[in-house]
Structure formats: structure tokens, C-alpha cells
Image: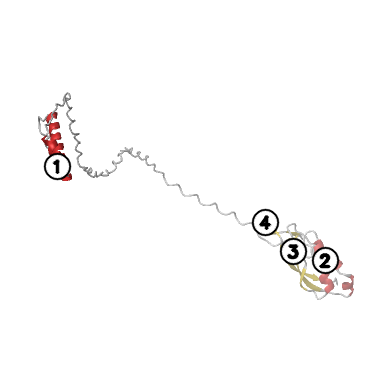
Amino acid sequence: MAYADEPGMSTKRLISLVLVGLIHVFLGYAVISGLALKAVKVVTGPLETFEVEEPPEVEEEPPPPPEQLEEIPPYVPPPDVVVESLPPPPAPVTTVRTPPPPAPPPRVVVPPAPPPPPPPPPPPAGPTRDPRPITNRGNFGFGAQDYPNASARAEEEGTVTISLLVDTRGRVVDGSCQVVSSSGFDRLDRQSCRLAERRFRFEPALDNGEEVQARFTQAFRWQLPD
């Protein structure tokens, strides 16, 4: 449709061109179908023309301008952001003022202690002794009156040695008499121990001035009067 595109072409001219085109088409068809004669007659007849009243021209609104697409810039990825880890801030430095050391106390000079006094001398040792027989009572030793009757009749005589345990009161402990050396006669030996435990009295023995038990040993003579 190049004609339609020419500038200044009217609508009337366009209709005429259309009619001419239709006639040409019709004539071609009549020739082919054997109707050429009728077609010649029709064609040779007077061509009636008529005016076609043109409708009022309507000003066509210009087409809207083509929508301009906004150019989208190509996607550019943002650059990689490298976050540098910052070192932690240094700890605040606290200055502690150290007080000066206290002044040393004045030196006290202590004189040396005097030497301890010498220990007192030990008390003098008390007396130490064996038991002492008390003889002023006349009851120490054996006489003719102490003879057993059987020994007197048999005229038994001899020396007997006995050992006695004397307590702190000066008395002979019962049953402590021991015959150290016999007189030769059992009756005289037994009579010696019996009388000694019953009658003998002593001053107790001393050990460093303290009365203690101790043994007393002595020989006694049995003898009949003449």
C-alpha cells in the first residue's frame, strides 16, 4: 500500500483507484470463464460516474510517541567491602601512686641480759645410817630367862645370826626374821626370831636424812649361867 502512504492523497482518489482495480479483476475473470463478450459489452457501455460525498475530514490525532523504555544500566555488582578488624583499644593505663615506705622505727639497742645467777649449791646431804637398836630399855638381846625349858635342861648353847626388817617406826616387821647362821639348835633359832620380832626396838634407818625401811643383821649368843 505504497499509495496510501503518499502524502496529500485524498479519500476520493483512493475510492476511484479501488473501483478501477475491481473492474480489472472482473474483466480478467470474464475472459477466463467465457464471458468475455458480455464483459466487452459491459465495458463498452457508457461508464457512469457518481460522486461520493466525502465525509468530513476528521483530524486524526497523531499517534502517541512510542514509549521510550528507560535504559536500564547493566548490573554491576558492588565491590567487595573488606572490613578490616581493628585491634581492640588498649586498656586504659591506671597509674597507681605507691606511697613511700614508712620510715623504719628507731633502732632500739637492747643491752645483753645479765648471765643467770649460778644455781644454789645443793643442800648438804642428810645423814645415812642403818637401823640403830635401842638398848637402854634392857629388852635387846637374850638372857638365861629367855631359854626354852627343853633347851635349858639339855644345856643347849650357841651363837645365832639373824636378819630383821625394820620399818620407819623402828619396829620389826612381823615374819621378816631370817636365820643367817644357826646356833646349832633349832629351838634356839626359832626362839631368837620370835623374841626379836616381839621385843626389839630401833631408831629407823636414814637415807639422806629420810627415814626408810632397812634390814638389821646381828649375831646373838645363847649361854646358860654357871
Q: Nearer the viewer, mark 3 or mark 1?
A: 1
Give the mark nearer the N terminus: 3 vs 1: 1
Give the mark nearer the N terminus: 2 vs 1: 1
Q: Nearer the viewer, residue 137 or 201?
A: 201
Labels 3 and 4 touching (C-beta < 8 A): no
Which residue corresponds to mark 2? 194
Q: Nearer the viewer, residue 149 or 29?
A: 29
Mark 2: amino acid: Arg
Tag 1 secondary structure: helix
Q: Position of residue 208 (x, y in %)?
A: 64, 58
Name the colour scheme: secondary structure
Which residue corresponds to mark 4? 210
Give the mark nearer the N terminus: 3 vs 4: 3
Mark 4: amino acid: Glu
Mark 3: amino acid: Leu
For residue 123, above or below residue 26: below
Give the mark nearer the N terminus: 2 vs 3: 3
Give the mark nearer the N terminus: 2 vs 4: 2
Mark 1: amino acid: Ala
Which residue corresponds to mark 1? 36
Mark 4, other Cα within 10 Å: few <14 / some 14–19 / many ≥20:
few
The CA distance from mark 2 to mark 1 is 212 Å
The quarter of the displayed image where residue 25 is located = top left
Which residue corresponds to mark 3? 165
